[in-house]
Amino acid sequence: QVQLVESGGGLVQTGDSLRLSCAASGRTFSSYVMGWFRQAPGKEREFVAAIGWTGRTTFYADSVKGRFTISRDNAKNTGYLKMNSLRPEETAVYYCAADQRPLGDRHYANNQYPYWGQGTQVTVSS
């Protein structure tokens, strides 16, 4: 199995940018689809983005298209989420997740990922 650790969260202002990292250890990171999800207080965990094994295929939630970019560096066993033009409503704990199956529509759902990190807090002030 794979272990995931997120980093890079923090307090920013509206319109600022952040880059989150997800460091993987254990099994070969390149054989896992990686996803990013977020959960705001009192709300359900929601899909943000996902990336396939090689990084060539990506999925995004409509709300972040054009502003967020998911990427991965398999040589460093690390995935990334670059977030631009952040909004206050995007304040949440951001989680990375991993799954060994090929990237597909299933990966929009959080219950399709068996491996999760502990999350990193992102707070966007208005």
Image (spheres, rainbow, N blue to C red):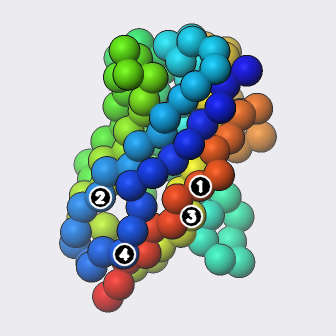
Q: Disc 3 or 1, which lies upstream in sequence? A: 3
Query: Marks 1/4: CA distance?
Result: 15 Å
**Label drawn at residue 93:** 3
Q: Quadrant of residue 45?
A: bottom right
Q: Which residue is mark 4?
A: 11
Q: Nearer the viewer, residue 25 or 96?
A: 25
- Residue type (three-letter) at the residue carrying disc 1: Gly
Q: Which residue is mark 1?
A: 119
Quadrant in the picture for the N terminus: top right
* Label pair 3/4, CB-CB below 8 angstroms: no
Q: Position of residue 119 (x, y in %)?
A: 59, 55
- Residue type (three-letter) at the residue carrying disc 3: Val
* Label pair 3/1, CB-CB below 8 angstroms: yes
Q: Disc 3 or 4, which lies upstream in sequence? A: 4
Q: Residues within 10 Å of mark 2 (few under 14, many from 20)?
A: some
Q: Which residue is mark 2?
A: 18
- Residue type (three-letter) at the residue carrying disc 4: Leu
Query: Marks 4/2: CA distance?
Result: 9 Å
Query: Marks 3/1: CA distance?
Result: 6 Å
Quadrant in the picture for the C terminus: bottom left
Task: Give the left or right position of residue 91, taking residue 109 as reference.
Answer: left
Q: Secondary structure at mark 3?
A: strand
